[in-house]
Amino acid sequence: MQPSKTSIGSQWLEGSHWNKALLISCACVLSACSGGPPPKLYLLDSPTVNTTIVDSATVSGITSLGMSPVVLPGYANDVQIASMNANGTITQDDRHRWAEEPDDAITRVLSGRLRQHAGATVLIEPWPRDYDPVARVEVSFDKLVRVPNGGSHMVGQILLLSGDGRALLKAVPFDINVAGADLSNQAFFRAVAAGVDDIARLAVDEILVLSAKS
């Protein structure tokens, strides 16, 4: 005796329901496996400054500076923290990230440190047409990584240009290592902030030397 069409149809529907249930279960399991807590975000803060220090730059006549957004290598401009391993490879940590785009964060802190050390108005391009800076600062990084001791290693150069950007006044290379106070990610960001402060101080010192010669 052959099964009826109704019986075959009901069996097919029942099997179809089981297949769908199985697919949904698998999808839920995969979703659970790929889930987890959200990544931790870290904000780059400006380092603490000693406000009792007299700014010699103000006396020297640096009243205004312009700067371009900093340029980072591709791996360092990802929000994942990039760490240099002992074997020379770089690992990006997806669970610990910058709270904002790294180039934006470093540009923000650098402009603030230039403002502090120069005692001058510092604007990031594009600036108003009537703004006439004494000099223009451009900073590009060839390397920015977290090192095994928890600190940061920065390599790159500072370009000091005339206020209109048409003349290169000086190219200043930098290679800055800042040790971390510990192995935490917070220590890394404090090390980055200290390194950016060193870059700002170096730029202002060089502008002072150039101003004295002119």
Image (cartoon, grey):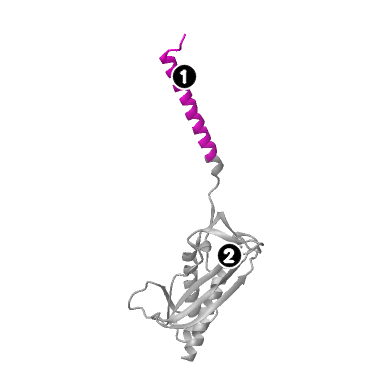
Q: Secondary structure at mark 2?
A: strand
Q: What x and y, as percent, mark residue 56?
A: 51, 84
Q: What x and y, as percent, mark residue 151?
A: 62, 66
Q: Which residues are magenta?
A: 1-30
Note whether 178 is above or below 30 in the view shown: below
Is 85 in the magenta? no
Q: Amino acid at mark 2?
A: Val
Task: Write down the residue under mark 2.
Answer: 145
**Mark in front: 2 vs 1:** 1
Instruction: Mark yes or no: residue 152 visible.
Output: yes
Pick the front one: 42 or 119: 42
| Residue 147: quarter of image | bottom right
Note whether 195 is above or below 94 in the view shown: below
Is 17 in the magenta? yes
- Tell me what residue is drawn at x 53 percent, y 79 percent: 172
Mark 1, other Cα within 10 Å: few <14 / some 14–19 / many ≥20: few
Magenta segment's dominant SS is: helix
Task: Write down the residue under mark 1.
Answer: 11
2 and 1 marks in contact (CB < 8 Å): no
Note whether 39 is above or below 152 in the view shown: above
Q: What x and y, as percent, mark residue 203?
A: 51, 79
Instruction: Mark yes or no: residue 55 visible.
Output: no
Q: What x and y, as percent, mark residue 69?
A: 44, 70
Mark 2, other Cα within 10 Å: few <14 / some 14–19 / many ≥20: many
- Tell me what residue is drawn at x 48 percent, y 61 percent: 101
Residue located farthest toward the top when viewing the structure as drawn: 1
Q: Secondary structure at mark 1?
A: helix
